[in-house]
Amino acid sequence: MRPIEEADRIVVARLVLELWGAHTAVAHGEVFFPASLPGFLVERQGHVLGMLTYAVANHQLEIVTIDALRRGRGVGTALVDAAVRQARTLGCSRVRLTTTNDNLDALRFYQRRGFKLTALRPDAVREARKLKPEIPAVGEFGIPITDEVDLERWVAPRQ
């Protein structure tokens, strides 16, 4: 695992487009450009196994995108752990993220890693589609994508 460097921006942009369907991510009414954000890459023998991008504001680190290209191998956990360490280093009091109501695997994954559900925004995805029309109508398990769900994990800043 290593921090994303300027030389990685093209690879990050390609992955974001491939995995997220656009060069943008939208959460809580805000548009993010993940390829321009700081983050981490997990690589093995020159192949990207995972990626996380984040933004920092108001003493919190927000995970904008996280992708483990092969699930069940600890890549996602390693990325979350790196984000938590980075939050501590930056003096942030919490790590937060937003997902959608259909993303049951993510909800399970984050809660098992210490995140708590903190907000539900019913029908928020309707507004998000105005900013990112590529968001599909139906997601995982055939569930209509309608709501945003926020999760947070409090962290003790480095002393």
Image: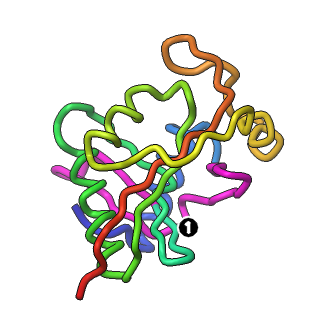
Residue 107 vs residue 81: left or right?
Answer: right
Q: Quadrant of the C terminus?
A: bottom left
Count of all numbered marks drawn on residues in the image: 1
Residue furthest to the bottom: 159
At 48% from the left edge and 50% from the top edge, which residue is drawn?
A: 65
Residue 11's image quarter?
Answer: bottom left
At 37% from the left edge and 57% from the top edge, which residue is drawn?
A: 153
Label 1 crowd (10 A; few <14 / some 14-19 / many >=20) = some
Q: Is residue 145 above or below residue 32?
A: above
The x and y percentages for residue 5 are 39, 72
The x and y percentages for residue 28 are 67, 52
Secondary structure at badge 1 equals helix
At 56% from the left edge and 67% from the top edge, which residue is drawn?
A: 36
Task: Using the image as rendered, state which of residue 71 and residue 17 is in the foreground.
Answer: 71
User: Is residue 49 shown in magenta?
Assistant: yes
User: Is residue 41 shown in magenta?
Assistant: yes
Task: Using the image as rendered, state which of residue 83 and residue 22 is in the foreground.
Answer: 83
Residues drawn in magenta:
24-53
The type of colouring in the image is rainbow
To which residue does mark 1 refer? 36
Prevailing secondary structure class for the magenta stretch in the rendered image:
strand
Task: Using the image as rendered, state which of residue 33 and residue 29 is in the foreground.
Answer: 29
Residue 70's image quarter?
Answer: top left
At 65% from the left edge and 18% from the top edge, which residue is drawn?
A: 144
Q: Is residue 73 above or below residue 114?
A: above
What amino acid type should be assigned to the residue bearing mark 1? Ser
The x and y percentages for residue 95 are 41, 62
Residue 143 vs residue 115: left or right?
Answer: right
The x and y percentages for residue 88 are 30, 76
Q: Quadrant of the N terminus?
A: bottom left
Q: Is residue 93 above or below residue 159?
A: above
